[in-house]
Image: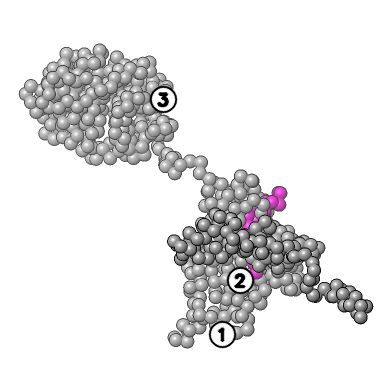
Amino acid sequence: VVKMTSTLKGITLKGSAELVAEFFSFGINSILYQRGIYPPETFGRVTHYDMSLQLTTDPKLKNYLTDVVSQLKEWLFECTVQRLVLVITCLETNDVLERWQFDIECDKSAKESSAPREKSIKTIQDEIRSVIRQITATVTFLPLLETPCAFDLLVYTDKDLVVPEKWEESGPQIITQSEEVRLRSFTTSIHKVNSMVAYKRSDSM
Amino acid sequence: MAQFGFENDIHSILKLDMPITNAPMARWQRKASSSTTAAGNGLSPGKSVNVSLSSSKTPSKTPGKGKKQTPSKMGGDRFIPIRNSKQMDVATFLLTKENEPDNPTTTSAKAMSVTLNGYDLEDAKILHLGGKPLNAPEYQNNLKVLYSQGTTPASTKKTRYISSTPDKILDAPQLRNDFLNLLDWSSRNMLAVALHNSVYLWDATQGDVILLMKLEREEDYICSVSWTKEGSYLAIGTSDCKVQLWDVENQKRLRSMASHTARVASLSWNDYILSGSRSGHVHHHDVRMAQHHIFSLTAHSQEVCGLKWSPDGRYLASGGNDNLVCVWPRVSDGSMGNESQAVRSWSEHQGAVKALAWCPWQPNILASGGGTSDRHIRIWNVNSGSCISSIDSQSQVSSLVFAPNYKELVSAHGYAHNNVVVWKYPSLTKVAELSRVLSVVLSPDNSTMATVAGDETIQIWKSF
């Protein structure tokens, strides 16, 4: 029992990368559901982080997210990723309407020492839960997306990274005249994720 | 040796590190000597006086001042910058840097990229999985329904189902189709209805019907019925100018009060009873006293069709065939004087006013409805005397009642539509329209209403 709890309390780089990747998977699904990018009937309810979450059942979207998140997990493990951005664009005009930005700070020293850090998974998941709660709560102030929308995921990586197959370089897709709202952050003690959402100011729409 | 002497002279002239002996005094030397002599000789009198004063009287006060001043005063006509404090090195560096062609573009480009991209692109690559951004084909979210509020949550209640057919229909033969008050529902859940010259009680809980009383003479008829607050006594106004008081439990007449000179078309209780008659007089009867007629209110010139005490018992509203709506103050038991003046008297209605209702949740709000020639429902503020709102109901208003469960106002109508309308209060938007009615009363639990119609039926509606 003592051994069990001790392993549960620590976190390694691998575990951290997995936790953060998992957060992105649930977080992106939540945003797509809450913001109505995909129809609500294409989502299924799951329980995770002690809360009810919506996961897509759309096969195309599911594949896409699995591809991105598994690649992201690799980069998180290598500590070469700096930021993940979910961009919501108007399908017609390609205007960027919303930009969910997750800044990732990697503690690269974790690559050298494999000793697990002193932070329990439960504490980390509690922090993650409050971030996802905030994402859910944002729909109350974010402007309504009144046109059909598309989304894209941008990953900011280190400059020297070799671009993998199927991936390509992109522009930052910044919103002109945006309002920004900072959300909570969480840390696994190896990866720290700061969240923020920027949206087009309503008077400029 | 003369040539040597000449040579030496040449040497000394060419040697510049030697002081020039025969040259005129240097400017700074002249200046220094003249200023020292001036100070020493006391050529500037003000200064010397100052010095002497300061030395004799307050020697310790400003010792550094004189010293500090002298050097700057010495070169007083020129500005000699103190280079040390001007950070010449930094300035030079910055100046020279500015001239370098390469630097500005890179730094400003960097700053520009940071502000534009929110990120220094030198440090990162932005990647995305190849292909177009993803979207759900042909899908537009309908969150507008969820997150935009067109209607207030309270008003969604009005979409509750209101049955358009009555819950129950009771036969009411020989019901007089007139501007009378023939229906009342007691707090003990007994519905009293006057049919020609008899009063029937319908026990709404049990469903039993009791004949309470019947007038002796066939040509007489009942004009009004009214329950006391407790529901144990019923007052009955008759066409032979009397007000009868009945103990319902024992089915016994307690007393018969005569004071009017015409039929008693309206009754309203407030501890003791009040009656209004065709003569236009409203009489206060204290049922506890032998001399029951204690007061008269005279403002109406024609029959008093409607009488209602406010729920708090402070005001009495009366409506007459003369199109007047009057509001009276409560008369205290002892006072028999003639101080009773109507607090308000409104003549806006164009027809007889039988329908009167006080708002139970908003004190001082009175609703009144006019007859066939008027058809308006008006809401009054008794405190200010103003008409808050009015609406043309398109039919004669025969009865009004406030339904507190949903904050609605119910109006019963005679000619032309003979219907019951449920209005949202205070907006007076129509909630429901039910059919064929003369008068309406509300059950004690406010959930059901009973209506009497000219087709000789009593209809029970579970509307609230």
Other residues around mark 3 within 10 Å, as few (<14) / some (14–19) / many (≥20): few
Where on the picture, by quarter, is residue B270? top left
Where on the picture, by quarter, is residue B407? top left
Numbered disc 3: what chain?
A: B
Query: Closer to the camera, A204 or B371?
Result: A204
Disc nearest the viewer among 3 and 1: 1
Provide the secondary structure element on which disc 1 rests.
loop
> Are dots 2 and 3 on a single chain?
no
> Which residue is painted at 85% across and 72% down in the image?
B13
Q: Write down the residue under mark 2.
A: A105
The kind of residue on which mark 1 rests is Ala
Provide the secondary structure element on which disc 3 rests.
strand
Task: Determine contact: label 3, label 1, CB under 8 Å.
Answer: no
Name the quarter where the N terminus of chain B is drawn.
bottom right
Q: Main secondary structure of the magenta part?
A: strand
Numbered disc 1: what chain?
A: A
